[in-house]
Amino acid sequence: MSLDPISRFSDHSSDYQKYRPGYPEAIITYLEQNIGLNAKKNVADIGSGTGIFTELFLRKGYPVIAVEPNAEMRLQAEEHLGYFKQFKSVGTRAESTLIPTASVDLITVAQAFHWFDTQQVRSEFLRIAKPGAHVLLVWNILQNKTPFLKAYQQFKEGFSGSKPYRDKADQEQVAHFFDGAAITVQEIYHSRLLDFNALLGYFRSSSYAPLPGEVQYLDAERDLQIIFDRFEKNGKVKLEYDAKMFLGKIAL
């Protein structure tokens, strides 16, 4: 497994696109009601991956510049979202987006902020932000409340011990990024039902998961099947998430 934050998802990009959870549409409603976001505003989705969060805005008619340095993940987004006329894909790092200065009303980062150089990214976001622009940081946090979710989380921990970042949604890191500006923290619950193949694909989408042909893969598939068989109802298990949002202004 590569420890480079850019390349470590390359072999997982197809599973990432197919099996990672989406985000609730209530996020858009929240932004429209609380910061006056509308489809005339420009959105930049940074660290956009395979475009899962990008799509949420495109489907509501927003123009979105998606910035993603990983070629395999970016290609997934371009193949999936290329038919949206308001979609623009840029292959570069978050720390140097190539976006024109003072051109963006909302900067979003979904599931990627913990990979960034926080200081450099703050400077870059200040450069591309219009006066009064907001930054939205979002993580889909898998809950750990049900017997199934506890078993699944324990299973995953057997493979994820080498994560090269601090806890996701680290509030101290987020507060430091916003540099004393007021931050609104909001959580939106959502869930989905997965059959075994989808659950296996979801696990494979993690950067630390073994892939078919690798030494640990067959054992991992067997152990996951045991967990699934124990908790499934009508052939599916329920994954529950909190979409945790940090919203604040990045520019005066």
Image: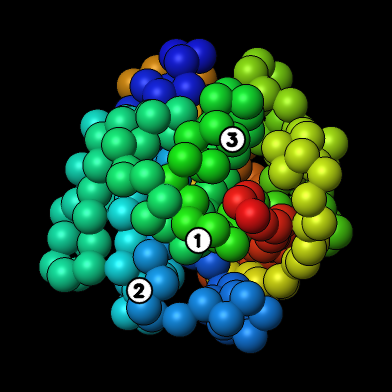
Secondary element at image label 3: helix
Secondary element at image label 2: loop
Q: Give whichever of 141, 46 is nearer the camera.
A: 46
Residue 217 drawn above or below residue 146 = above
Q: What residue type is labelled 3?
A: Arg
Q: Which amino acid does label 2 sit on?
A: Tyr
Choose the circle earlier in sequence order: 3 or 1: 1
Q: Position of residue 245 (x, y in %)?
A: 69, 59
Q: Where does label 2 land, which residue?
A: 62
Q: Residue at x 55, y 32 (%)?
A: 123
Q: How far apart are marks 1 and 2 (CA)?
A: 11 Å
Q: Where does label 3 land, which residue?
A: 122
Mark toward the viewer: 3 or 2: 3
Q: Is residue 50 left or right of residue 232?
A: left
Q: Give whichever of 100, 219 is nearer the camera.
A: 100
Q: How far apart are marks 3 and 1 (CA)?
A: 14 Å
* Tag 1–tag 2 contact (CB < 8 Å): no
Residue 114 drawn above or below residue 29 = above
Residue 82, quarter of the rendered image: bottom left
Q: Residue at x 50, y 14 (%)?
A: 3
- Mark 3 residue crowding within 10 angstroms, few (<14) / some (14–19) / many (20+): some
Q: Where does label 1 land, which residue?
A: 106
Q: Is residue 222 left or right of residue 67?
A: right
